[in-house]
Image: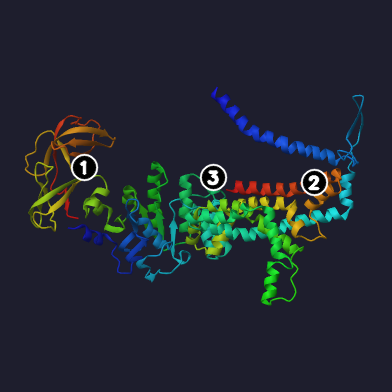
Amino acid sequence: MAARGLRLGRLLVIGVPMGWLLLFFLAPFLIDFKISLSEVRLAIPPYAPLLEWADGKLVAMHLQLTNYRYLFTDSLYVSAYGYSLQVAAVSTLLCLLLGYPMALGIARAEPARRNLLLMLVILPFWTSFLLRVYAWMGLLRNNGLINNFLLWAGVIDTPIQMMQTDFAVYLGIVYSYLPFMILPLYTNLEKHDGTLLEAAADLGAKPLAAFLRVTLPLSVPGILAGALLVFIPVVGEYVIPTLLGRPDQLMIGRVLSDEFFANRDWPVASAVAMMMLVLLVVPIVAFQRLQNNAAHAR
Amino acid sequence: MTAADNGAASAPLSAAQPCVRIEGVTKRFGEFTAVDDVSLDIQEGEIFCLLGGSGCGKTTLLRMLAGFEQPSAGRILIDGQDMAGIAPYERPVNMMFQSYALFPHMTVQANVAFGLEQEKLPKDQIAQRVEAMLSLVRLDGMAQRKPHQLSGGQRQRVALARALVKRPRLLLLDEPLGALDRKLREHTQFELLGLQKQLGVTFVVVTHDQEEAMTLANRIGVMDRGRIVQVGSPRDIYEYPSTRFVADFIGSVNLFEGRLTEDEADYVRVACPELPAPVLVDHGVSAAPDATVWVAIRPEKIQLLRERPEVADNIAQGTVRDVAYMGDMSIYLVVLPVGRELRVTRANLQRKEEEIFESGDAVWLAWDAASPVVGTG
């Protein structure tokens, strides 16, 4: 009786999020997949049905992969995919290089100060994301705050072109996604047993050696979690590259939105989304495997 | 005889400089004084135990020897070299941590090799020394295991091997047996003694467990509120506690307050309000006549009798309240007419005890003049 109650409880606990995912992730995914296989059409909805019915009988099925083939024939898509992956990889690395010392600093701060420092990391979230990107535009523009100041100070004669460059994209992305690197890293580092470092020192390891041999290997799960949280959303990032980035080099998120809203080509937009998913699954699986290994190693 | 010259006499007689010299070391954390003006010499090859309750400063003192804390005042010399400003990784000292602090992501082999790798020794030499050390602590075959795959006793031996493989001048052990169960502790205690004898390393052990201190140590330093209150061999500490605190802390004891009525060079008499007869003690005490003193009598030094013995001193009458049969011995709680409870232990020497005291029996208690300890501090 009690066992059955427990089983029912477990079923509920697992079932609710499971149902949520099925309804709002798997179902849209399947619909999207279906659209990606159909033909574009000037109608509402703007694509041809896969199955053709007449008198309650299936008369024809239109399945085609042309939308996918199209992605590889037009260099726009390939370059957008490549650029997105590059931006995501470089940004993740930059976030890690910046975020690790910050997370370590917070984790090693006095317990009473840690919450304050964490608060400062989260503080930007109190303002709208869009607003913060606009604020960067105000700073980076040719007649923006930074250029005006440098001109006034006599450091430069002509404004530095910062907007619509890779620099602006990286700056915006690293700025926006840094907390997602810091928080999982902090969670990991904060749990480290301080006596391990004392033991390392006692055995003759200088602070750098102790960090490299003890702290760093033990923080791999945190690094992977943070990298995953930055890399995946950055691949599909739309707002930052659109507002700050180069007009001649699109990221895949922008392409997707253009296909969908400007071109009204739902099938190709769906195919773009599917391909993005495929491209993301590879690193996610690799990350997860690494993480499992790291977890087993403990 | 006082306990102080006892302690000095039992230290190894070596004219050479001590392995560790602690000179007037004080450690303050803000307002709190953890270690208060401690001076101590620890000789080469000795096992020295710092014994005390929690918060007495023993661990802080150990951490200052390791270099994790810096003294607020005073000096620590190891082999005559002042350790001020010398980082933990530069000291000829290794420590076995209470939690063992094994690196969870490394194998047993890598844990033990870690310290030697920091010395940048050649690889084959490291492998050789690690292997030899692992077989010394009987962990051969475990080299490729991770710490979480080991039992508590095995982890303890990895921690010991990891510290000893560096061939330190001084090994610091923080509650080395604290995490082991009782059977394993006894076994490990003797193993530890054997290893120490074999390697000749000086041990400084911190413990709150007097049994651990008694079996391991050549000398014990009892600490209370940041100060060392007595240094001596386990026997001195037990038989000749110099203060009331030590008498009470080590083993169990019956403590009385009393007034000094007779004060001669080789004996004293103390009148204790809780005892009907005066207490005769066969050693002197440096106190003014009529001074208030304490008297301590160990439970195993009190005899239980049916009849009143023919003596005037060192007796009391009471009723057995409780008997706890422990197998090798029994503990009797005897209540005196004034309501004071005394603890008496008796070894169960024979399987069939000729005289069995039971709860409710009226008994006489008696002890030798050589048994009580008297003091003022």
List x then y, in percent, for residue B188: 40, 48
- Which residue in the structure is indicated by mark 2? A273
Would you place residue A138 above or below residue A268 in this image? below
Tag in front: 1 or 2? 2
Left or right of residue B251: residue A255: right
Q: What is the three-letter code of the residue carrying label 2?
A: Ala
Q: What is the three-letter code of the residue carrying label 1?
A: Pro
The residue under the point 44% across, 60% down is: B94
Q: Secondary structure at mark 1?
A: helix
- Cα–Cα span, label 2 and label 3: 46 Å
- Which residue in the structure is indicated by mark 1? B299
Q: Please report contact status of discs 1 and 2: CB closer than 8 Å, yes or no.
A: no
List x then y, in percent, for residue A262: 84, 49
- Cα–Cα span, label 3 and label 1: 45 Å
Would you place residue A35 above or below residue B147 in this image? above
Residue B149, numbered label: 3
The residue under the point 19% across, 43% down is: B301
Q: Chain of mark 3?
A: B
Q: What is the three-letter code of the residue carrying label 3?
A: Gln
Q: How is the image coloured?
A: rainbow
Disc with the residue nearer the chain's start (3 vs 1) = 3
Front residue of A30 and A133: A133
Is residue A86 visible to us here?
no
Q: Chain of mark 2?
A: A
Q: Please report contact status of discs 3 and 1: CB closer than 8 Å, yes or no.
A: no
Front residue of A230 and A262: A262
List x then y, in percent, for residue B320: 18, 33
List x then y, in percent, for residue A133: 70, 57
The residue under the point 75% across, 64% down is: A163
